[in-house]
Amino acid sequence: MGIPSYFSYLLRKHPYIITALQPADNLYLDSNSIIYDMVSSMDTVNESDLLQKVCEKIDFYLSLVQPKRVFIAFDGIPPMAKMKQQKDRRFKSWIQQTMSNAPMGWNTMQITPGTSFMNALDTKLHAYFKHHASRYESFQLSTSKEAGEGEHKLFAWIRDHPELHQGQKTLVYGLDSDLIILSLHHLQYGEIRLLREAPAFMLQDRELHVLDVPKLAESIREIIGETKLSDYIFMTLFLGNDFMPHFPALNLRTNGFDTLFRTYTSTIQSHEHLFDGEIQWPMVQKFIAALALQEENIILKEYYSRNRFHVDASTEEKRLQNLPMLQREKEHFICPSKKGWQNRYYDSFFTLPKEDICKNYVDMLAWNMQYYTTGCTNWRLYYSHMYPPLLEDLVRHIPTTHSIEPCEERCNERELLMYVLPPLYYKFIPEGTSVKSVMPTLEWSYCRYTWESHVRYVL
């Protein structure tokens, strides 16, 4: 997933970064999206056919690129911060399915480590690719039985084996926009480009594209400075990702990046950094303070803009898609044009003190950059709220130094399934597991589409 709408934003701003497929030394596949693609391509899903199609699709990419080295990675048990996002996504899908009464196809909830389907896929992958190792200088296969997100398995391999990447061309396949951020963050290891199908909005028939990450990096450096690429990585966190929500005043769809760039270039000097291997918290505080000065005006502007927005509710499908623009009771209650809106914001979305919320957010800033840079140091930490604190409060709780306490304790497959699956799909949990029922609702204040909503859980 990653930053919402990030790929389409990049294509609008930097259309020249899409290039033709060229030979590559390394082909690394973040493969979970291939399962979803194969499900979508089948009118009726037969599980054995699906397993075969997934393997054949991977084989197609290997034949197309003809690399010297291969890494095929699937998602295993992720850190808790990612589990929270997986749970939200699955519950959201369940709620939207219930609201729309759309016919049920093959249940993609099964694409979760520990289900019988994923166990069968693991077995199939090892059988299908057992003779491939002899065809390549290096051949790695990491299934759902090995912990970690697929994309982070790939980049951990790159970090651990710099000799295989310096002076080499690496092509990474996957649809997650986090791959773009990770690739930008690992260019010191060699040339990295991304291979992916065209998104639906481009209207091509799933044509393959290559995103030239070095070209993108060059464009970013021209905007914010030659040595500032890591600062760009850090700034993307404020736009939201799989682990943290975006700020109401910083939305990629409504010039959020422009606000970040403009504020950065006017606030952070050429010799200063937000991140230079470590987070420079005094500079971060300086940057957030400059953003906080603009926060109320931006939220007010967004509020009036959303009031004027014409929403298409001509069909039930469009009405359900646009619910965040049709039902805005909490936004109207908060009403940034009236005094005290900040207190109403916290009353609407939080039950804990501001200090605790800000500390949790600061923890996640540090956790994110460690995760992107060296891997996961704490498998249990996560952001426990639907919305971020306001910038004007966050700036008062930025530390001068900060570190994340390591925690290697991971969930097992059963715990993962118990946590992320809605009640309707408890059938995918191994027998003998006790579960606690939860009744979720959607919270879509400041969202554009229903699929962007947050999930509120009631035990």
Image: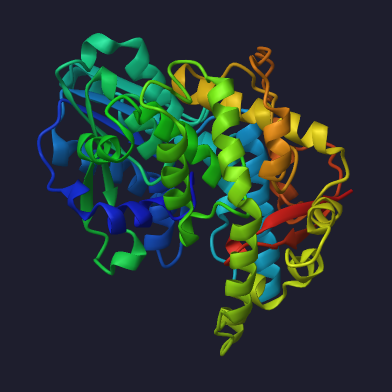
Q: Is residue 363 above or below residue 423?
A: above
Q: Residue at x 22, y 43 (%)?
A: 60
Tell me where residue 434 sits by quadrant: top right
User: In the image, residue 85 lies at what x, y percent?
Assistant: 63, 43
Closer to the camera, 396 or 363? 396
52 vs 125: above or below: below
Q: Residue at position x 30%, y 39% from top?
A: 220
Report the label total: 0
Residue drawn at point x = 33 percent, y = 59 percent: 199
Q: In the image as oriented, which residue stretches furthest toward the bottom?
A: 314
Q: Is residue 102 visible from the viewing direction of this image?
A: no
Query: Foreground: 344 or 215?
Result: 344
Q: Is residue 283 above or below residue 193?
A: above
- The foreground one among 425 and 33 is 33
Image position of 175 (left or right of 215)? right
Q: Position of residue 367 (x, y in %)?
A: 59, 24
Residue placed most toward the observer, 252 or 194: 252
Residue for point 59% across, 86% down:
313
Locate residue 144, reporting x and y percent.
51, 30
In this picture the colour scheme is rainbow
- From the top left corner, tell me how far across and down residue 77 is, in percent: 59, 29
